[in-house]
């Protein structure tokens, strides 16, 4: 699903005459606040959907797929998603 498809689905489901531009601003604001929450609090929980959790990856040794040469991979942060029980049941 693309962003435009999501916006159109939300418009149809809520049966509102809200403009696409306004809905786009609202959705952008929602996702921006999710990013801020994950960065600040290391997680974002949405009931009956799931949790976005900030995870720390340790530095490790990897392999260059072209040459087979060993390389060092720096420590990094990533976001993991854990679906809720209800979400898992419908999948």
Image (tube, rainbow, N blue to C red):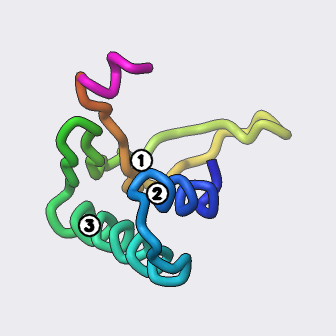
Q: Residue at x 18, y 42 (%)?
A: 47
- Say which of 30 and 14 sits in front: 14
- Asked if the residue at tag 1 contacts the one at tag 2, i.e. Cβ–Cβ closer than 8 Å, the answer is no
Viewer-side label of 2, 1:
2
Disc 3 versus disc 2: distance between alpha carbons?
Answer: 27 Å
* Residue marked by disc 1: 59
Are dots 3 and 2 in contact, CB under 8 Å?
no
Q: Report helix, strand or loop for mark 3.
A: helix
Q: Residues within 10 Å of mark 1 (few under 14, many from 20)?
A: few
Rendered location of residue 13, percent (x, y): 44, 51
Task: Tell me: 69 left or right of 60.
Answer: right
Secondary structure, mark 1, is loop
In x, y percent, where is residue 38? 25, 61
User: Sequence order check: which comes first, mark 3 or mark 2?
Assistant: 2
Question: Quadrant of the rendered structure where residue 64 is?
Answer: top right
Q: Which residue is mark 2?
A: 10
Q: What stretch of residues is rendered in magenta?
A: 86-91
- Give the label on residue 39, or none: 3
| 50 to the left or right of 19 | left
Q: Residue at x 22, y 54 (%)?
A: 44
Q: Is residue 2 magenta?
A: no
Instruction: Mark 1 or mark 3: name the one nearer the start of the chain.
Output: 3
Asked if residue 14 is positioned above or below residue 32 in the image, the reply reads above
User: Which is in the foreground here, disc 3 or disc 2?
Assistant: 2
Label 2 to label 1: alpha-carbon separation: 41 Å
């Amino acid at each position: 699903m693309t962003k435009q498809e999501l916006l159109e689905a939300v418009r149809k489901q809520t049966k509102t005459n809200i403009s696409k531009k306004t809905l786009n601003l609202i959705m952008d604001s929602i996702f921006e606040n999710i990013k801020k929450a994950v960065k600040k609090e290391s997680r974002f929980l949405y009931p009956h959907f799931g949790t976005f959790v900030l995870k720390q990856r340790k530095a490790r040794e990897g392999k260059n797929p072209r040459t087979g040469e060993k390389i060092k991979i720096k420590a990094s942060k990533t976001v993991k998603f854990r679906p809720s029980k209800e979400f898992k049941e419908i999948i």
